[in-house]
Image (tube, rainbow, N blue to C red):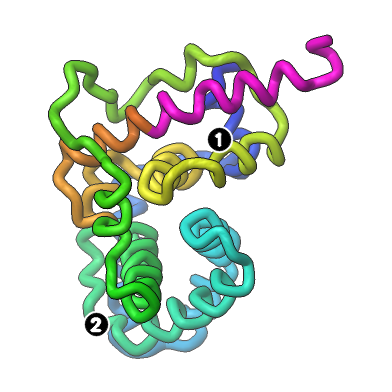
Amino acid sequence: MGTVSAIRALFTPASVSPTEEQVRRENLAVSEGLKRKDTALLDQLIVRYQHRLLRYLLFLTGNREEAEDLFQEVWMRVLTRGTQFNGKSRFETWLFTIARNLVIDQRRKRTMSSLDELFEAGGEDDRPLAFEVPDHGPGPFDRMSNVEDREQISAALLQLDTLYREVLVLRFHEDLSLEEIAKVTRAPLSTVKSRLYRGMASIKPRLERAQNRRPEAV
C-alpha cells in the first residue's frame, strides 16, 4: 500500500462512493434546508462532518482550544448564512471555506496578516514547476516508504508550514479535488499544485525518518 493509500485508510472510513447524481441531489436538498434554517438538518450535518471539520481546524491552527472555538463559530455561520450555499458545489467545499475564512479573520485580528501574507513572508515560491500533480491516481506520496502509524503522520504534517499542511490535508484527508482546494483557499490552480508538490517534497523526509525510528526498522 502506498503512503497516500495509507493516509486515506487511516483518516477516512471505508464507504461506497456516491454517484454524481446522488451528490447533486443531496447538495440541492442541503441548500433548500439551509435556506429554511432547518435546525434538524443542521444537527445531521454536524453529526456527519464534525470529525472532518475539527480535524481540518486542528491541522490549520495547531491548537485544540482554538480549533474547538472556531468549530462552534463555523456552524453558527452555516446556520446564519445558509442562503449563500446554492448546492452547485459539494457542501464540504463550502464548509471548509467558511472554516478557513474564520481562521484568517482570527489571525488578522492578532497579527493584521492573512495566512497567505504570513506564508509569503516565509519565502514561498509559486513559480511554475515542470512537475504536474495529477488530480487523481498515484502521486509523489506513493513513491515514499510506507508509514502506517496515525500519530507519526499527524506529527509530520504539523511540522509543515501552514499552507503546505492545509493543501495536503484537503487533498489526502478530505479527498477534495485540486479545483475544490483552489475554491477553498481562493488560490490559482497553479498555486495549489505548487503548494501540494512542495508540501509532499517537504513531508517525505520526515515520514522516512519516522519510519526509520520504528523498532522493526532496527
The secondary element bearing badge 2 is classed as helix
Residue 138 visible from this viewpoint: no
Depicted 207 relative to depicted 188: above or below: above
Quadrant assignment, res 37? bottom left
Q: Residue at x 22, y 77 (%)?
A: 84
Highlighted range, magenta: 199-218
Residue drawn at x 49%, y 76% as measured from the top left: 70
* x 52%, y 81%: residue: 72
Instruction: Reply yes or no: does residue 211 show up in magenta.
Output: yes
Q: Amino acid at mark 1?
A: Arg
Q: Earlier in the sequence, mark 1 or mark 2?
A: 1
Residue that numbered label 1 is attached to: 8
Question: Left of 124 or right of it: where is 163?
Answer: right
Which corner quadrant of the image does residue 102 belong to?
Answer: bottom left
* Few, some or many residues within 10 Å of mark 1 (<14, 14–19, 20+): some
Q: Which quarter of the figure is the C terminus placed in?
A: top right
Relative side of 154 to 113, left or right: right
Decide: is 23 above or below 165: below
Q: Position of residue 201 (x, y in %)?
A: 41, 24
Q: Position of residue 47 (x, y in %)?
A: 59, 69
Residue 50 position in % (x across, y down): 56, 66
Disc 2 designates what residue? Answer: 83
Query: Can residue 169 be spotted in the picture?
Result: yes
Please provide percent x and percent y for residue 196.
Answer: 34, 34
Q: Nearer the viewer, mark 1 or mark 2?
A: 1
Picture mark count: 2
Q: Amino acid at mark 2?
A: Thr
Q: Quadrant of the N terminus?
A: top right
Q: Give me the disc on residue 148.
A: none
**Measured Cα–Cα span from mark 1 to mark 2:** 32 Å
